[in-house]
Image (cartoon, helix red, strand yellow):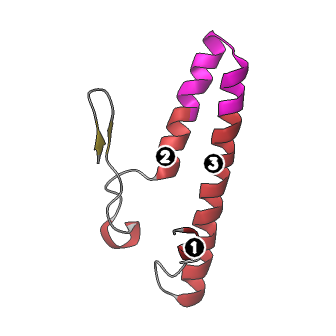
Amino acid sequence: MIKDEYIKVKWQEGTIKEVGVNGCQVIDVLKFVKQHLNKLDEQQPRPENKFTITSLDNAIHYQEMRYHNYEKASSINNVEGAFDNNKKYMK
């Protein structure tokens, strides 16, 4: 859990398949921040907001790709958590 004076995030613990939804995923937070930034940009448009929104769109896209690759690998291997292609990037 991430928590400070103004922010509290309850992360998903365990797989949804095994324990159900009990928190949020990274993509949920990215979408929430994008939605908030879009509202701010409507009130006071700034080029930096547009750049940040584009970066969030890219991050959301890659998280969706990660999810689809995970689902594809899980269905092929019939095992949840089978997609572990990111180990080489985790050093």
Give the residue type that dot 2 points to.
Asp
The residue labelled by disc 3 is 59
Q: Which residue is mark 1?
A: 71
Which of the two residues, 45 or 16, is positioned nearer the viewer here?
45
Look at the image and give the residue range highlighted in magenta.
34-52
How far apart in space, not on screen, are marks 3 and 1 (Cα)? Answer: 18 Å
Q: Earlier in the sequence, mark 2 or mark 1?
A: 2
Vertical position of residue 4 compared to residue 41: above or below: below
Which secondary structure is most common in the magenta stretch? helix
- x, y percentage for residue 91? 51, 69
> What residue do we see at 33% from left, 32% from top?
7
Q: Are marks 2 and 3 in contact (CB under 8 Å)?
A: no
In this picture, is 36 found above or below 85?
above
**SS category of the residue bearing label 1:** helix
- Identify residue for label 2: 28
Q: Amino acid at mark 1?
A: Glu
- Label 3 residue SS: helix
